[in-house]
Image (tube, helix red, strand yellow):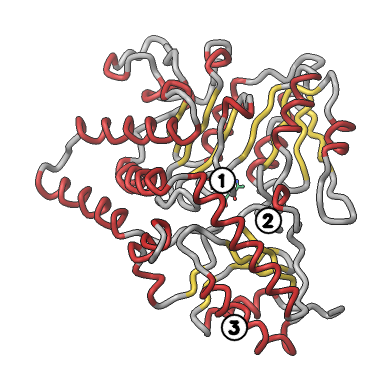
């Protein structure tokens, strides 16, 4: 008997002919998401411009993201990307006073470092928390970096390079104790673990739809904790960020009282169709069950790597590991290519091949990966292996 999650594997036709270990880059396409794209096309052919439905789609995505994060719809901005949300937020922060530091980590995806560095001309001082020799960043390192001058701690939940998961609950506690706000970049975790903004007591959370949320590129979200919304006035704005979109008032900027004030122009309509379908599928599967399955799969992958004597640079502790297992190689690009020739889809960053797991993966995917690695070991194992 298949479990409910195992049965859902059939909804992803790609999995019938590929070992797909690339959800940390882009998810496999589900039948329902493909149908959602087609529904948009049908709309275009049948009606042309179906704005009433399209605005409702945008709102439906907002509602589903809120449900996913245990937040309120008014706390969610639907953005074109994580970068767009971060830029709108950054534009609303003041770095001209004594509290001008932004603390980030060595684990950041470039956009969550570059955008904060881009605030330096506005007075921001960016502090990087370094990785320890063992490849992890413990809470003590954040303890040392966050101080009374810190305006914002902006850290990734899971590192896109090595799959390490930071203790964001602990980081949030330290930030709050020092009077700093806290932002979590959950792009590499949302959809693979349960993210509860209330439990995390997060001020801001960003993420997007193309990885574990089963949707598409070109759409993301920014969560802003309700009490903060009114006191933050983005200068990065647009007509969809206004209190009344239909007012078409060109005499003033009247931002929405909700997190919509962090939006900008015309919503990513076609992407909303896909995002809605992906989120519905994910929420139907259940994030707690997904989290458990991914934990088991990544653990099994690490155990199987151990068994063939191939190291990993991903932390072994369940609490410190996301959905990606990073596999070092003397030639990560070459190994990724060799895996692809064997119908195993992975990606690489730095000197590591990334095998990313979603609920639709199974033990046979790990069998295929390990069998290929055994064959490719003489050519691609790390030099010091
Ligand atoms: C952790 C993380 N943050 C941000 C991004 C990029 O976000 P966007 O391209 O939507 O700005 C990525 C993309 O892979 C990511 O992995």
Left or right of 74 in this view: 312 = right
**Residue at numbered disc 2:** 163
Number of residues whose C-alpha sits closer than 10 Å to that of mark 3, classed few (under 14), some (14–19) or many (20 or more):
some
Where residue 312 sits, quadrant-wise, is: bottom right
Camera-near label (1 vs 3) is 1
Q: Quadrant of the N terminus?
A: bottom left
- Where is 292 relative to 331, above or below? above
Along the line of sight, which residue is nearer the eye, 91 or 154? Answer: 154
Q: Residue furthest left?
A: 46
Q: Taking 178 as reference, is 155 left or right? A: left
Mark 1 or mark 2, earlier in chain: 2
Identify which residue, 41 or 371, lies in the foreground.
371
Which of the two labelled residues, at mark 1 and mark 3, occupies the earlier sequence position? 1
Determine which residue is flagged by label 3: 338
Q: CA distance from mark 1 to mark 2?
A: 13 Å
Q: CA distance from mark 1 to mark 3?
A: 30 Å
Return the x and y of residue 373 as percentages of the image width and height.
Answer: 65, 82
Residue displayed at 47% across by 40% down:
220
Q: Earlier in the sequence, mark 2 or mark 3?
A: 2
Residue nearest the viewer, comparing 330 with 81 = 330
At 31% from the left and 41% from the top, the residue drawn is: 269
Image quadrant containing the C terminus: bottom right
Q: Give the residue displayed 61% in from the left and 84% down from the top.
A: 371
Tell me the mark number nearer the camera, choosing from 2 and 3: 2
| Residue highlighted by disc 1 | 193
């Amino acid at each position: 008997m298949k479990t409910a999650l195992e049965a859902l594997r059939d909804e992803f036709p790609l999995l019938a002919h590929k070992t797909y270990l690339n959800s940390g880059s882009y998810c496999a396409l589900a039948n329902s998401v493909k149908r959602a794209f087609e529904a948009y096309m049908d709309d275009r052919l049948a009606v042309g411009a179906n704005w009433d439905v399209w605005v409702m789609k945008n709102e439906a995505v907002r509602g589903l993201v809120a449900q996913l994060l245990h937040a309120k719809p008014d706390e969610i901005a639907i953005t074109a990307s994580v970068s767009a949300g971060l830029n709108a937020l950054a534009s609303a922060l003041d770095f001209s006073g004594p509290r001008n530091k932004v603390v980030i980590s060595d684990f950041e995806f470039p956009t969550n470092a570059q955008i904060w560095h881009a605030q330096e001309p506005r007075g921001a001082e960016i502090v990087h928390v370094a990785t320890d020799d063992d490849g992890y960043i413990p809470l003590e390192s954040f303890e040392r970096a966050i101080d009374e001058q810190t305006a914002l701690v902006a850290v990734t939940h899971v590192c896109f390079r090595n799959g390490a998961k930071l203790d964001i609950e602990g980081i949030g506690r330290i930030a709050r104790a020092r009077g700093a706000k806290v932002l979590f970049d959950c792009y590499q975790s949302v959809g693979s673990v349960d993210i509860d903004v209330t439990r995390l007591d997060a001020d801001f959370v960003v993420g997007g739809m193309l990885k574990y949320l089963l949707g598409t590129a070109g759409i993301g979200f920014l969560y802003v904790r309700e009490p903060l919304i009114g006191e933050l006035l983005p200068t990065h704005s647009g007509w969809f960020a206004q209190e009344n979109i239909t007012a078409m008032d060109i005499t003033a900027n009247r931002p929405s009282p909700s997190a919509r004030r962090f939006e900008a122009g015309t919503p990513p309509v076609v992407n909303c169709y896909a995002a809605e379908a992906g989120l519905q599928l994910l929420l139907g599967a259940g994030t707690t069950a997904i989290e458990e399955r991914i934990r088991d799969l990544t653990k099994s992958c690490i155990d199987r790597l151990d068994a063939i004597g191939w190291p990993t640079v991903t932390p072994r502790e369940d609490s410190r590991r996301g959905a990606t297992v990073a596999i070092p190689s003397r030639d990560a690009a070459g190994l990724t290519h060799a895996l692809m020739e064997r119908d195993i889809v992975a990606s690489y960053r730095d000197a590591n091949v990334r095998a990313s797991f979603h609920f639709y993966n199974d033990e046979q995917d790990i069998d295929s990966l390990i069998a290929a690695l055994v064959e490719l070991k003489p050519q691609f194992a790390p030099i010091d292996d």
